[in-house]
Image (tube, rainbow, N blue to C red):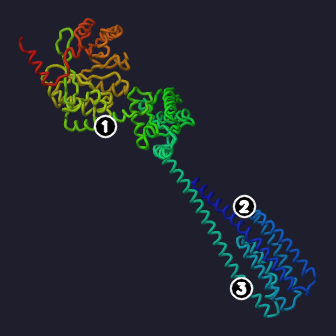
Amino acid sequence: MFRRASLAVGVRTEQNRAILVEQFRALRQQVPLMYALMLVDATFLSFASHGTVNMWWSLGMPVALALLGGVRAAFWLRRRSAVPDPEMIPRYLLGTTIVAVVLSLGFGGWGLVLYVQADLVRRACIALYIFIGAISCCYCLQSLPRAGHVVLLCGAAPVTLCLLFSADWFLRGVGFNIVVVTTVILSMLRASHAGFIEVLTSRADMVTEQRRAQGAEQRAHQLAYHDPLTGLPNRRALAEALETRMAGDKPLGLLIIDLDRFKSINDVHGHHAGDQLLRDVAARLGSVTGGQGVSYRLGGDEFAVIVDADGEGVRRVAHAIVQAMLKPFAGPDLVHHIGASVGISLYPNDAADRETLMRRADIALYKAKQSGRSQHCAFEPMLDAEIRRRAEIERELREAMETDAFVPHYQPIVALASGVVVGYELLARWPRGDREEIGPEQFIPIAEECGLINLLMLRLLRRACRETRDWDVAISINVSPIQLKDPWFSQKVLAVLTRERFPPQRLTIEITENALIVDADSAQQTIASLKNQGIQLALDDFGTGYSSLQHLQMLPFDRLKIDRSFVTAMERDPAAMRLVHAIITLASTLELPVVAEGIESASTARTLARLGCAMGQGFHFGYPMSMEDIEAARTAAAQPA
């Protein structure tokens, strides 16, 4: 309420100042003309009284009035092209009113003296000259009504009173006529001044509204073209800037920047910490690019920079950004460690239009993230073909999901001591007829990115439960880190097992170490829920991720799997042999059975058995096979030799 009141007072003050300025401007134009009219009128009065009064009244008095009027006219003429400070204008207006009083008293008194000494005809002429002069001056002072009223009162009133109380009816008629005309003219001047004030007030209101509209337009422009969190220009501003710059011939580079490990900051410390980190990133981007580029925020944790340089200069800026983002960000309570991946596209080398330039920078960014994050990558034509092929795979993958085209294959897991098959690992295969074969290493990441991995895994599990229900051995299946974030994941798995009447004890869920790092709390809750349902748990690819003894101690894993990269290198690399031995010893201490992946020879199997490894899988024991091939092999093994 107080804010609205102060705003209203401010508007009124602004209007009053505008009225004062306009009054001054009007007087600046009209007052010199008024003095000129007064000089002419005084000259006629002097001529009309010449010979009937002494020289002072017929000549000296008009000269004195003309000199005083000339001084005031010069005052206004000097200010003809300048507008003073509004605070000074009231002083000028007060001065004008005082001078009007003095001059009108002098002019009216002089006229009264001339009237008293004149004959009947001259009295009528003198009265008309005085009245015409007063009315003319009053019109010239209509923007300052009080001064105009003073002129009429002090200038014309004395002679008019003499006319009204004259013994001659002719002079009384002239006086009465002057009073009527004066009344009408005063009414007209009052209406004219009110209109003048109304026009000025409306104009001031219009100016105020224009300023408000301009302010609103500026605020709307700020919101439309700037990110409210960081203050950086946004995606729309980037698009328009690229259109403008690419209209010229100067080379430039577009950097698309995606922050690494930012989501964990939001998840662990809250959005307030994430927002502050984004502001810090924006400030650091500005300091790194300096005068070489302009930074933009595209949304989320994605930024962009336009760099005015050639290819080498653009790559230097990209490298500087990657290095700068690796440095810690110190907050009031926390220190955050993140990174940034940068994709680069160049104009005109990589694209001739804005959309292509941005798309190819995105493609380069995707490659940089694939290369291990905290990298910068420039666009190459082969990347475009790779992205198109990936998009085609995604389209076909969605179609394959609709037709349930993915089928489970099974790779045996063997007890190394006896050679008996104790289980099978479930692996996804995508039969595509005569077309190029796409391996799981390609379509599984795509399924994760487009949100289909959960559906794919559950459909494969459902089919595997039907196919292996009567095998009397366990099956194991890998889960993605993304699936562990689903709070209903364990219930979905149990629903499949219940529907297919598959014992939970015969299912092993394999979880990678990296999945435990992505979202440790969600992973721990999901693991506990799966374990409570009787499902077995295996820590997969041990040694290749963020290995932690705490994971083995705190989480209820039933077995540990050694990654194939260590197993295949055992016989030629003593360091790999020592590492495998250390893992097996550690697992034995924790009473965890060990499964070795990637066994491709009998000698490797014997070595692992000697080291204390319980189980193994690999091409030495069998390739992943369909249900039909597995059952044929089991039937053949059951027949007597």
Q: Which numbered disc flags the more N-terminal residue, 1 or 3?
A: 3
Marks 1 and 3: which is nearer the front? Answer: 1
Circle number at residue 180: 3
Kind of residue sitting beneath label 3: Val
Q: Say if 559 sits above or below 164 in the image.
A: above
What residue is at 17 percent from the left and 15 percent from the top? 421
Q: Position of residue 133 (x, y in %)?
A: 78, 80
Please name whichever residue, 145 or 545, is drawn nearer the observer in this view of the structure: 545
Q: Quadrant of residue 551?
A: top left
Kind of residue sitting beneath label 2: Val
What residue is at 23 percent from the left and 36 percent from the top? 401
Query: SS for tag 1?
Result: helix
As measured in the structure, the alpha-carbon distance from the residue carrying label 1 to the one carrying label 3 is: 95 Å
Quadrant assignment for the C terminus: top left
Q: Which numbered disc flags the more N-terminal residue, 1 or 2?
A: 2
Tell me if residue 265 can be seen: no
